[in-house]
Structures are given as structure tokens and as C-alpha cells.
Image: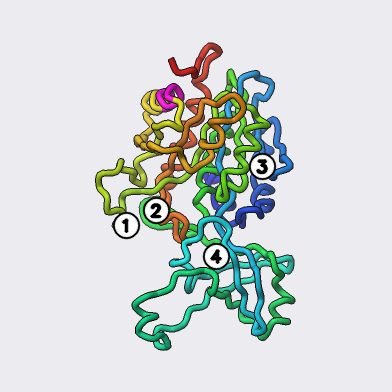
Amino acid sequence: MNQSSRNFLYQLLETPSPTGFEVPIQKVVNKYMQGYADTVETDLHGNLIVGVNTKAKRRVMLAGHCDQIGFMVRHIDKNGFIYVDPLGGIDASVVPGASVTIHSETGQIPGVFGRKPIHQQNQDERVKMKVDLEPMWIDIGARDKKNAENLVAIGDPVTFELVITELENDLICSPGLDDKAGLFIVMEALRLCARAKLNVALYSVSTVQEEVGLRGARTSAYAVDPEIGIAVDVTHASDNPAVTNQKNSPCELGKGPGIYTGPNVNPVVEKSLIDCAKKAKIPYQRLTSSRLLGNDANAMQVNRSGVAAASIGVPNRYMHTQAEICHLKDLENSAKLLAAFVKAIGPRTSFIPR
């Protein structure tokens, strides 16, 4: 991965984008992609639609959602402790003791989720930890309610502390890799196609509100009206002790992007992705889903009169925690695969299953 691309990825990971509060990250994407795109537009929903070769009649849409799970301030008590609601699928069991940042009009306010110390817990509390976000509180060090309200307002978004930890063997750990990894990949794929002679218009879309119902993909796909739509999202890695069912399809970090098969996937697009991976000698993994996928491919597939949909899964450990892990090479190879796929579409290429 070249240094410019890596810097862009890290900037995405360090920029807050909890569901419904995606404006800051869209500004980052907008600024970076201006140097590669023919068009960059923001719709009323907040999706950022980046296009190249936009005069072509046939259209391909690559979707990576920019929103991350987070919290929203709902109450400040008399002592200045802050209570929150979840934005997206929060795993409450990983919250106690976590460092967080409240993104307020006064700036970034650091805090921590408090927890009753083990010394003060009774036996029942020790054995049966109640995992419920509702009674948990954030401590920002405020003296009282007035002090807290001078810094924080009801409705302010909150994220886990946005830090990047570089691990061994090209692994990175950060909250929000779901799905800033996918967002990075679709923009990187467009960058790789920006100077190529394409037979299609390519739109890479930074979609919003995926974590609360694939909402951004629905509206942006309607506007783009693509023939082919590919969602890029993280998927559960199988190469760690948390995975006990060894009969599932293997999905390992560093082994390349996962290419899905199943009812949410157009078989012609799927085969083309595999053919492109083989031709370009890009490592890939086969992933299966007998049900509709829980990502933007689900929304794109049934847009208007139907879209030839597919999905790329990026192996990810510890999803929806503050310690998600991905392999940098998987991100790079995913972008190369998508670029190869787009470049391979000819004037007569048909994606109608026959």
C-alpha cells in the first residue's frame, strides 16, 4: 500500500462517523477524492457519490458504508455523569472501562465508561454481570451537572476512542474498521480506475446509516441506478479462538478478500470476480451466505428493476468492539480486485444469469 493511500485510511479511522453523524468523514473523503474523480456529490441523505467516466450509459456502483457504531448522549445527572443510547449494534459487554470521545460543539471531550469495582460488588454481581447499556455512565471528570453541560449537550454523538494500533505482520487494530475498511477499498478502487479507459461509469459511494438498516444504500442506489452493485464490508474472521464452529467456511486474515456466493449474489458477477482474481493473481477466499446479506448488497439488489449485486467480505476480528482487526494486504487486494473487475467489463459483457 503506498503511503498516500495508507495516510487516507488512517485519516478515515481517526475521523468520527457514528450513525447519523457522518458529515466529518464525508468531508475527508470529498477532499481526498477531488484529485481522482470527475464528479463528487452529496445527496440529501448524506451519501457521498464519487464518479468517474460518468457519461457512460452503463453504471457500476461500489458501496462502502462510512458510519460506525457509537452512542448518543441522552442524560446528564446532577453529578455530571453522562448516560447514552446506542447508535447501531453496540455489544454492551465490552463497554465497561472503555475510553470514549464525546464529539461536542466545544470540541472532543474524552471520557471513560465507569464500572463498580470488583471490591464493591456482591457475590451475585460478580457471578452474574448484568450486560445492559441503559444504566452505564460516562465519566468526563466533571464537578457537577453545570460543569458537564458547559462541555456536553444532549444529543452529542460518542465514539470509542479513535486510536490505531499497528500489530505484527501488517495487522491494524482500530474501532470503526467496520466499515471504514470497505469505504477505503471502494475509493481506492476508483483511484485505480481513474486514468483507465472504462466501458462503464464507475460510482464509488460512501453510504450512510448502514448500521441502522442499510438506509444510505437504498437512497443512493436509486439515484445512481446501477446495472451492477457491489457492497464491500467486513466479515467475521475464523482464525481466532472466538470461533468454535470449524465447519463454517474459513475466512482468514491475510488470505485475501472474500467473494460471496448465495441468493444475494448475481452468479455472473461472482464468476467474473473470481476470474479477475485468478487472472491478476490476487488471493481470494470463497464465502457463503444462504440468507440475504446484512450489508449494502441487500439493499442494492432490489433497487428499481433489479441490480446484478455482489459482495466482497474483508476478514475482520472482534467486530463491533473497540478492537477490530484487519490485514492491510486484504484491503489493498480488495481494491485491486474491484479495479480489475471494472476494467474487464466490455461493451457486450452481460450480467444477466442464463
Considering only order in the chain, which callout, 1 or 3, is on the residue closer to the N terminus? Answer: 3
Amino acid type at image mark 3: Asn
Q: Earlier in the sequence, mark 2 or mark 3?
A: 3
CA–CA distance between discs 4 and 1?
Answer: 24 Å
**Which residue is farthest bottom?**
120
Q: Which residue is mark 1?
A: 242
**What amino acid is at disc 4?**
Glu
Residue 314 rendering spot, x and y as whole percentages: 43, 43
Q: Which residues are magenta?
A: 267-273
Compare marks 4 and 1 and give the one earlier in the sequence: 4
Secondary structure, mark 2, is loop
Q: Amino acid at mark 2?
A: Arg
Q: Are marks 1 and 2 in contact (CB under 8 Å)?
A: yes
Residue 91 or residue 174, whichever sits in front: 91
Query: Taking the image as drawn, is residue 195 in sight?
Result: no
Mark 2 vs mark 3, CA separation in Å: 27 Å
Relative to 352, 24 lies left or right: right
Dots 4 and 3: beta carbons under 8 Å?
A: no
| Three-letter amino acid code at the position of disc 1 | Ala
The residue to which callout 2 is attached is 317
Q: Please report whichever mark, 4 or 2, sits nearer to the chain's N-terminal start.
A: 4
Q: Which mark is residue 47?
A: 3
- Would residue 143 be visible to someone looking at this image? yes
